[in-house]
Image: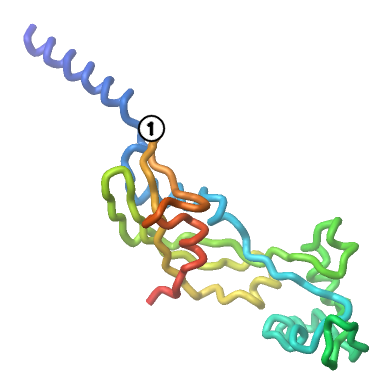
């Protein structure tokens, strides 16, 4: 009888603990990974702005445009420089037939009518959590990540093997742990700042 009462008490206590706590109350590496990957800042893609029409010599000779030209996706012809683009030379840039075939499907219908449009070329991929430092209701999480090309343009422009390291702050709320987004309190680092301050991992 006594054992039965003890079992009942233990079950009741377990139920209370279960109701009071949720999996998000324990900042494990798995939870930290899930929250980082779900962060809007982390999910924001890398984009490359394609500028067709007359552009400056500096823009035309940028590493990105040189890659596009070597791949045969764009062509450039000498053009007169409008006042904002002086000094000459300037270049009238257009997509080649291969460029149209490669780049055109990546352009939104609204941007297709413009000569200046963004193309999504890569998404962040979380490589792993390398450390968690907790202090009261806050925590700093170290993690590594890299850019993963999502199309042929990204494969040409993005260094997919380069791994970055970042540190982001977490805070424990009544519903569990959350990644700090946007402008964080002093001494904490939000996801936006963490990604901007990323350094290549050793």
Residue drawn at x 28%, y 50% as measured from the top left = 134
Depth check: give the residue in front, 168 or 31: 168
Taking 2 as reference, is 121 above or below it? Answer: below
| Disc 1: which residue | 174
In this rendering, would 14 be left or right of 97? Answer: left
Residue drawn at x 85%, y 88% as measured from the top left = 90
State the image quarter where residue 86 is shown. Answer: bottom right
State the image quarter where residue 165 is shown. Answer: bottom left
Position of residue 15 measured from the top left corner of the image (x, y, whole percent): 28, 20
Taking 113 as reference, is 174 above or below it? Answer: above
In this rendering, would 81 be left or right of 147? Answer: right
Depth check: give the residue in front, 182 or 2: 182
Position of residue 58 measured from the top left corner of the image (x, y, whole percent): 74, 87
Outermost residue toward the right?
Answer: 80
Position of residue 199 measured from the top left corner of the image (x, y, whole percent): 44, 73
Residue drawn at x 39%, y 42% as measured from the top left = 177
């Amino acid at each position: 009888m006594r054992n039965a009462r003890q079992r009942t008490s233990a079950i009741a206590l377990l139920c209370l603990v279960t109701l009071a706590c949720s999996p998000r109350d324990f900042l494990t590496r798995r939870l930290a990974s899930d929250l980082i990957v779900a962060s809007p800042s982390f999910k924001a893609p890398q984009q490359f702005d394609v500028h067709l029409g007359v552009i400056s010599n500096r823009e035309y000779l940028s590493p990105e445009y040189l890659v596009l030209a070597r791949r045969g996706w764009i062509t450039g012809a000498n053009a007169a420089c409008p006042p904002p683009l002086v000094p000459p030379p300037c270049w009238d840039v257009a997509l080649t037939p291969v460029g149209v075939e490669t780049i055109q499907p990546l352009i939104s219908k609204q941007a297709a009518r413009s000569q200046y449009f963004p193309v999504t070329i890569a998404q962040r991929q979380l490589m792993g959590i390398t450390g968690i430092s907790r202090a009261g209701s806050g925590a700093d999480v170290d993690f590594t990540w890299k850019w993963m090309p999502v199309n042929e343009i990204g494969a040409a422009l993005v260094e997919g093997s380069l791994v970055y390291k970042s540190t982001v702050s977490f805070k424990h709320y009544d519903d569990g742990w959350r990644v700090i987004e946007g402008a964080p309190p002093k001494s904490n680092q939000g996801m936006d700042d963490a990604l901007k301050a990323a350094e290549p991992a050793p």
